[in-house]
Image (cartoon, rainbow, N blue to C red):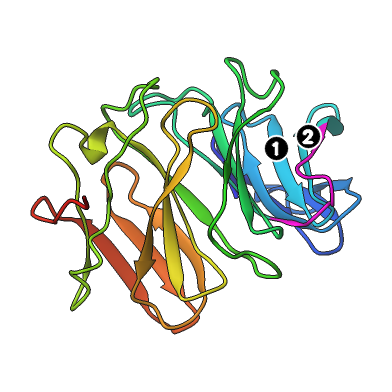
Amino acid sequence: MFNPADNNVFASGTSRKILTIMDIRKPDNALKFKNDGMINSLYICRDGQNIITGDSNGYLKTWDIRAGSALQSLLNESTKKPISCVAVSKRGHGNDEEPRYMAVNSYDNVIRIYDRGIEPPKTQLKLIHILKGYKNKGWPIKSSYFFGKDYQYSTQRLTYDIYDDSQMDSADHVVYEKDKPLEASLLLATGSADPYAYLYNVGGPEETGELIQRLEGHTDFVYAVDFHPFEPILASCSADCIIKIWAPNAKGKKKG
């Protein structure tokens, strides 16, 4: 992943338990930090000075590049299942502040959503949602956020469905209620170690995260998903060698 503060610098994590930061202008002077487990996923903070890693021992660590050490270390779950993905949401469209919410995929078949606080990465992580229903054990499954341009943190639970299973002939379509448009939502999509992608509503109060729909159409494991930066358009890639694009459809049917 390239450093958002300097595109000449990128970071990588390896199965040899090494976090490497390299400047392409000085390739012989790479910084290397030793970790306790294989680094399966990483995220570089907007300041370019802090990196979050998820590893094979189930730990989330925040590294300070200048100090050359981990500032924070958090065990994602008690049995130390490996982490396969760390994904962050936006703070808002056109807002370059550090994202507040972080999703962590784990080999225990659970996604945990953390609130990073008002001043991440300095503030401590707080677990706010536990998402179940998808499968992750033993596979490098990835997830992705959609931050609607009109989204505001709400105390009300969203009750709409997003995808219409009846329209699976040539493409998959997003549907929504007029009073709860996608543009006002905070959603998380994930791949899964089965032929489906899964979509969750994570925009409500603490402990209200819920599965909205299982997306059907692939015939093998769905390894990764990725939302468009601004639009509610989702791409999913699978071991069936097919990439599917899921697009909005205002004419879809609402489930009763």
Question: Is residue 82 magenta-colored?
Answer: yes
Q: CA distance from mark 1 to mark 2?
A: 5 Å
Q: Position of residue 7 (x, y in %)?
A: 54, 42
Other-residue count near label 2 (Cα within 10 Å), few / some / many at <14 / 14–19 / ≥20: many
Secondary structure found at label 2: strand
State the residue position of label 1: 51
On the rendered structure, is 2 left or right of 30?
left
Q: Is residue 121 visible?
A: yes
On the rendered structure, is 108 left or right of 241?
right
Residue 235 has which mark?
Answer: none
* Residue numbers of the magenta segment: 73-83
In the current view of this chain or complex, which residue is farthest to the front?
256
Q: Position of residue 198 (x, y in %)?
A: 44, 59
> Is 220 above or below relative to 175?
below
Residue at (61, 16) in percent of width and height: 119
State the residue position of label 2: 63
In the current view of this chain or complex, which residue is farthest to the left?
251
Residue at (63, 52) in percent of width and height: 110
Residues at circles 1 and 2 in contact by the CB criterion of under 8 Å: yes
On the rendered structure, is 74 left or right of 192?
right
Q: Is residue 8 visible?
A: no
Amino acid type indicated by mark 1:
Ile
